[in-house]
Image (tube, rainbow, N blue to C red):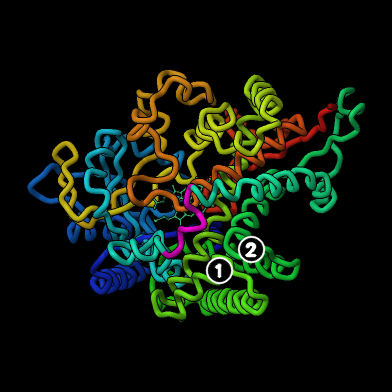
């Protein structure tokens, strides 16, 4: 399908009620569009028509409050593509609509909030918040992730979260720290092998110091760092995996990546009927689903036959006992591994890039790591270290999504007189909170981990968003933090790291194009340190 060429991309989650009305409305719009485009070549006219109609049907706010503005609905999916793939630019551009504005996800209004005050108001009843169906992204996403923990709400969410989160709780993550650290060390030790595997050559223009060490090579950061967090998370759930299982899982990851564009493009992919428009996309979807299910059935079988009890087997037993459905199981597995693949790669790549580009930060980190060698594993779990501050500062500046995944409140929310209707999706402009917010001071755009030294944890509550809010905080936050910090600590302990490529003319970094999160598209030069 031609649309695909224009929207290489990604992502995951949401939707609202009244799907039937929405379907009818959407198909009517498509019919109108066809007529207009054929007759007048009028894409602009079509967008205006859709925008006006949607505003007439539901603006997302009550008419007895202030009115709300926002960007015009655009083909093919409102602002979904911009929100997910072009977030940083749009976060700045859409400021002209004020601190609270509306965007469209397909035919659903989403309200964007940008200040800590509004964040506090919105989360005053966070325990009752819901998740709009399929994250307002439509049917295709629903087929892969519709029943994952992150998209459920109410009692169902509470129950499924209790089922899935035991291996990821704080105590469990601490108990695994030796495994996490060993895996991170192995990952860093094996990086030189990637220079051949990735067809990378030795760095050009090697300096005298590098010649002496004779251990200098460059890597494309995303490609080189992707598998480490993926297989580490897989290990938490599946236990030890053999080479064949790892290969099968990676093949499935590649198939999953090929589905990501359909998650965001919208149009026909928002509806089950879209299968008639693009049968090969539908076949890819079914192929992935079948492979994902088979792979898990076999992994459970193998572990059971050897008497191995790992979280995978325990989750499967919940399914067999009828406590959760097969989709609950498969979709949550997908969320933890596949949907998260880009997330964890993004976090690791940015953390390394930002430290590498700040010489004094890199030096301080190396010294701290050296000073903590004897208690290295407990050092990794601490939160009052330079390493942890580097991790947080990187999350602050380079959030995985510029516009948060979003939630809906069951009550009316009053944002300075704009009254948001109950059950309407509200998303947070994370850059507005984490960077443009006056709380962070005049150097808010700079990478300065030391800033966290003097900030009280309680002051961060509505001024920083990293792992989500309230009850819906990230299930993998502890494992996630440990794995990133372990990899970063080992890397900078063994190598001098330099960003050699990936800058734009304005000094900002290039962003990886084939992902649903804004990963750094950089190359790094690693030079082995002489010890
Ligand atoms: C450092 C890396 C990570 C970061 C920065 C991160 C960030 C986030 C954020 C911001 C959310 C909230 C999304 C929302 O608003 O709904 C979230 C949710 C979630 N994350 Fe993570 N994540 C990371 C790693 C992981 C890992 C390794 C797992 C594997 C289990 C994981 C599993 C989940 C799940 C299941 C949810 C949904 C929680 C719920 O709604 O109950 N995350 N994550």
Taking the magenta stretch, the answer to whether it contains residue 166 is yes
First of labels 1, 2 by sequence position: 2
Q: Find residue 312 and name its label.
A: 1
Q: Specify whether residue 280 is in view.
A: no
Question: Does any portion of residue 149 appear in the rendered image?
Answer: yes
Q: Position of residue 220 (x, y in %)?
A: 72, 44
Quadrant location of residue 33? bottom left
Q: Is residue 369 above or below residue 43?
A: above
Give the camera-side residue of 37 and 70.
70
Residue projecting furthest to the left: 64
Residue at image coords 65%, 25%: 368
Residue 261: which disc? Answer: none
Determine the secondary structure under disc 2.
loop
Q: Assign the N terminus to one quadrant of the image.
A: bottom right
Question: Magenta span: helix, strand or loop, mainly?
Answer: helix
Residue for point 46% across, 46% down: 401
The residue shown at (56%, 61%) is 338
- Above or below residue 136? Residue 217 is above
Left or right: 513 as drawn, with respect to 324: right
**Residue 528 location (% of width, % of height):** 82, 32
- The residue under label 2 is 239
Residue contact at pointers 1 and 2, CB within 8 angstroms: yes
* Label 2 packing within 10 angstroms: few (<14), some (14-19), many (20+): some
Identify whether 218 is placed above or below 412. above
Where does residue 202 sit, x and y in percent of width and height?
86, 39
Q: Which residues are magenta?
A: 163-170
Question: Is label 1 in a helix, a strand or a loop?
Answer: helix
Q: Quadrant of residue 283?
A: bottom right
Instruction: Name the image quarter holding the C terminus.
Output: top right
> Is the residue marked by circle 1 packed among few (<14), some (14-19), or many (20+) residues within 10 Å?
many
């Amino acid at each position: 399908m031609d649309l695909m060429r224009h929207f290489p991309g990604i992502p995951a989650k949401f939707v609202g009620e009244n799907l039937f009305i929405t379907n009818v409305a959407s198909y009517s719009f498509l019919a109108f569009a066809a007529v207009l485009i054929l007759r007048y070549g009028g894409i602009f006219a079509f967008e205006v028509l859709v925008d006006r109609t949607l505003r007439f049907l539901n603006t997302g706010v009550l008419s007895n409050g202030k009115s709300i503005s926002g960007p015009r609905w655009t083909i093919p999916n409102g602002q979904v593509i911009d929100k997910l793939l072009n977030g940083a630019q749009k976060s700045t551009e859409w400021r002209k609509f004020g601190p609270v504005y509306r965007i469209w996800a397909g035919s659903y209004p989403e309200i964007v909030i940008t200040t800590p005050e509004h964040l506090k108001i919105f989360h005053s009843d966070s325990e009752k918040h819901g998740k709009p169906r399929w994250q307002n992204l439509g049917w295709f996403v629903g087929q892969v992730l519709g029943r994952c923990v992150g998209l459920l709400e109410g009692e169902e969410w509470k129950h499924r979260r209790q089922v899935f989160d035991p291996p990821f709780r704080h105590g469990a993550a601490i108990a695994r720290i030796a495994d996490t650290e060993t895996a991170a060390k192995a990952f860093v030790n094996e990086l030189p092998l990637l220079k051949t595997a990735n067809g990378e050559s030795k760095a050009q223009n090697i300096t005298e110091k590098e010649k002496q060490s004779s251990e200098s090579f460059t890597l494309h950061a995303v490609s080189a760092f992707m598998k480490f967090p993926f297989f580490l998370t897989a290990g938490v759930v599946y236990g030890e995996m053999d080479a064949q299982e790892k290969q099968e899982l990676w093949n499935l990851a590649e198939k999953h990546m090929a589905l990501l564009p359909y998650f965001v493009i919208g149009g026909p992919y928002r509806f089950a009927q879209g299968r008639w428009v693009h049968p090969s996309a539908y076949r890819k979807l079914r192929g992935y689903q079948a492979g994902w299910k088979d792979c898990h059935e076999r992994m459970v079988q193998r572990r059971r036959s050897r008497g191995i009890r790992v979280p995978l087997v325990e989750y499967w037993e919940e399914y067999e006992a009828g406590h959760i459905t097969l989709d609950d199981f498969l979709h949550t597995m997908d969320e933890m591994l596949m949907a998260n693949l880009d997330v964890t790669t993004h976090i690791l790549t940015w953390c390394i890039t930002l430290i590498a580009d700040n010489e004094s930060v890199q030096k301080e980190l190396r010294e701290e790591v050296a000073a903590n060698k004897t208690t290295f594993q407990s050092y990794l779990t601490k939160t009052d270290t330079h390493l942890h501050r580097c991790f947080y500062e990187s999350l602050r500046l380079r959030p995985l999504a510029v516009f948060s995944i979003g939630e809906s409140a069951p009550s009316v929310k009053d944002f300075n007189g704009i009254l948001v209707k109950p059950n309407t999706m509200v998303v947070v402009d994370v850059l507005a909170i984490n960077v443009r917010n006056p709380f962070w001071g005049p150097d808010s755009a700079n990478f300065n981990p030391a800033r966290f030294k003097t900030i009280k944890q309680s002051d961060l509550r509505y001024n920083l968003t990293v792992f989500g809010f309230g009850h819906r905080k990230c299930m993998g936050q502890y494992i996630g933090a440990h794995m990133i910090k372990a990899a970063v600590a080992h890397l900078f302990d063994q190598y001098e790291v330099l960003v050699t490529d990936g800058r734009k003319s304005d000094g900002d970094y290039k962003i990886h194009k084939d992902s649903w999160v804004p990963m750094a598209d950089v190359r790094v030069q690693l030079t082995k340190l002489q010890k």
